[in-house]
Amino acid sequence: MYRHTLPLMLVLLMHSAPTYALEIEGVAIAQTTPSGDSKTTLLLNGAGLREKLYIDVYVGALYLPAKTTDAGAILAGEGPASVLMHILYKEISKQKMTDGWIDGLDANLSSSELQAIQPRLDAFNKLFTAAHKGDVLKIEYTPEKGTEVRINGEWRGAVAGNDFFRALLKIWLGPNPVDKSLKQDMLGSS
């Protein structure tokens, strides 16, 4: 009897534990994440480390309905998508974080494109506080809801428009990404 129950117990354990695709700097990256519409499960497209001046800042992970290495297709998409940022640095002030969004957008958008989203960017920036090591920021686009922000699972607010979310994605996937290595990792092409 024992020899029949052991394989069954192993199968049950394998299916009940969370499944992780990879581990980066001690952060376990899940293979999937639920979408905000609760109808879709997003798949890990890729993940990598954001470094600045040899300092590990965060692990960034991109989740999409279907995997692709085509940044242009992702930026032109209209469906749900999610970016998770697992903070590694001891503290990132709200000002440094919002300056980072602005710098990344400034490097990838024309002045007219940036001006068009500026009121929504201001609203987006108000959703953040200082981030600390261990915090998880989830920036997710759901067509019915817009760009939602959650910090450690706590809903902070939403900003309307697919164009706004796709502009944010350019911070990581645009022609002048915040980190070229992280772009390749998020695209799953490294």
Image: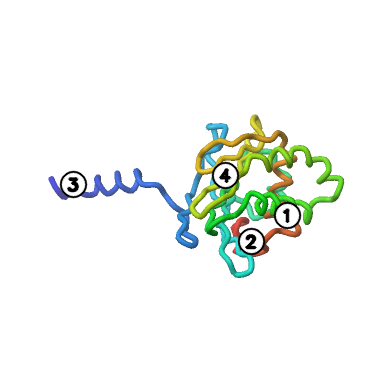
List the residue tagged with mark 2: 184
List the residue tagged with mark 3: 4
Q: Residue furthest top?
A: 144
Q: Earlier in the sequence, mark 3 or mark 1?
A: 3
At a point 19% along the width and 45% down the height, the residue shown is: 5
Instruction: Specify few, some or many for label 2: CA neighbours under 10 Å numbering under 14, 14-19, or 20 or more.
Output: some
Image spot of residue 137 (x, y percent): 56, 46
Q: Earlier in the sequence, mark 1 or mark 2?
A: 1
Q: Is residue 125 left or right of residue 30?
A: right
Disc nearest the viewer among 1 and 2: 1
Q: Earlier in the sequence, mark 4 or mark 1?
A: 1
Label annotation for residue 73: none
Image spot of residue 130 (x, y percent): 59, 49
Query: Alpha-carbon distance for marks 3 and 4?
Result: 43 Å
Q: Amino acid at mark 4?
A: Lys
Query: Alpha-carbon distance for marks 1 and 2?
Result: 16 Å
Q: Earlier in the sequence, mark 2 or mark 3?
A: 3
Residue 22 lies, with reference to residue 81, above or below; the image says below
Image spot of residue 53 (x, y percent): 63, 69
Callout 3–callout 1 Cβ contact below 8 Å: no
Q: Amino acid at mark 2?
A: Gln
Q: Quadrant of the N terminus?
A: top left
Label annotation for residue 138: 4
Query: Alpha-carbon distance for marks 4 and 2?
Result: 20 Å
Q: Earlier in the sequence, mark 4 or mark 2?
A: 4
Q: Residue furthest bottom?
A: 54
List the residue tagged with mark 1: 104
Callout 3–callout 4 Cβ contact below 8 Å: no
Disc nearest the viewer among 4 and 2: 4
